[in-house]
Image (tube, grey):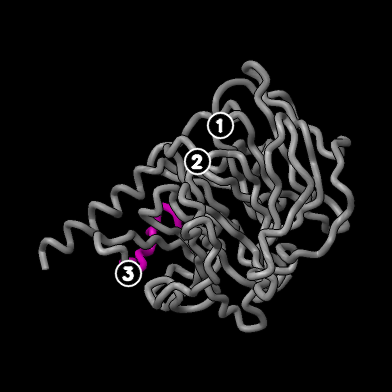
Amino acid sequence: MKKASLLVLIITISSNTVFAQESKESGFNFPDLEGPYMGQKPPGMVAEPFALGIISTEGWEVEGVFAPGMKEFYFTTSRGEPFSPTVIGFRQEGNVWKKYIEFRRRGEMAFSPDGSRMHMAKGYKDRIGDDWSERKSIGSSFEEFQIMRLTASSKATYVFDELGMPNGDGVIRYSRLIDGEREMPRPFGKEINTGRMNAHPFIAPDESYIMWDGRREEGYGGSDIYISFRKADGSWGDAINMGDKVNTAHWDAYASVTPDGKYLMFNRSLDEDGNNIDIYWIDAQIIETLRAKQQSSKKQK
């Protein structure tokens, strides 16, 4: 796979092609894991692969997310040929994590902050007891956009990207829920929609910041993860590169914060070709460090 084709691969598998019926049949096997965070020792301020050798292997593993309540974990993988992106879901039963479901991906996964909804691009499922509803459409206002990832705040504000091919110039948009009505999607300003390949946004539950990945001239190479903090007047601050604790010379993307607010999870490519992508995590204090640095910089001006 050539370097230039990495984005094409990521975007192609994120499209809303109709896949086969979901299945709880076992195609992937994992050992039982015990304790919080899938039994993994939490990282500090140095990013580490998540569940090395179990979840993060020498292959292609992306989009690691815990559901609110921290009792479920999902990630997407494709191991072997043909290439077939599959979502694997784990559930904590007592103190033990066990795989409980797998299904073909139909959009990148994210959860509403209250855990009642599983978003998958232009579709979603509502939680029904220990199961999920059939996939539903988020509405006709979003049909024109080839969405890869959509995340939602506690106010039900949607923030989402688009395919942006062939030039990788995707735009990140938002849509608020106002008096019970969903407004038409609007693009963010130049603070966020600058450079190329802006994608995979994550909005904080309280809407105090947005993270996404993209390419800018001042970046480390490949795709870097950026953050923008909301100002007191409601506007968005300039994009801040999250630095070399998160970003590398390769593809770094798909950032989110665990529902307990403690850890930042993201994807990192370990080679130029994107054949080996792992899920990484780091202490979410890095966000507060950047926020404090931005506030200090403003005071000095």
Prevailing secondary structure class for the magenta stretch in the rendered image: loop
- Describe residue 295's horizontal placement relative to residue 288 as left or right: left
- Element on which disc 3 rests: loop
Residue 238, numbered circle: 3
* Precedes in sequence: disc 1 or disc 3: 1
- Describe residue 44's horizontal placement relative to residue 54 as left or right: left
Q: Amino acid at mark 3?
A: Asp
* Precedes in sequence: disc 2 or disc 1: 1
| Quarter of the image where one finds residue 26 | top right
Task: Examine the rendering and report whether any part of residue 226 can be seen.
Answer: yes
Q: Looking at the picture, does residue 275 appear above or below residue 215? A: above
**Residue sitting nearer the eye, 47 or 200:** 200
Q: In the image, residue 84 lies at what x, y percent? A: 82, 55
Q: Looking at the picture, does residue 216 appear above or below residue 10? A: below
**Residue sitting nearer the eye, 61 or 264:** 264
Tell me the quarter of the image containing the N terminus: bottom right
Q: Which residues are magenta?
A: 236-248
**Residue sitting nearer the eye, 229 or 51:** 229
**Crowdedness of circle 1 by 10 Å Cα count: few (<14), some, many (20+)?**
some
Contact between marks 2 and 1 (CB within 8 A): the answer is yes
Residue under label 2, please give it: 258
* Residue lying at the far top of the rendered structure: 94
Q: Looking at the picture, does residue 65 appear above or below residue 38? A: below
Residue under label 1, please give it: 70
Q: Residue at x 44, y 72 (%)?
A: 188
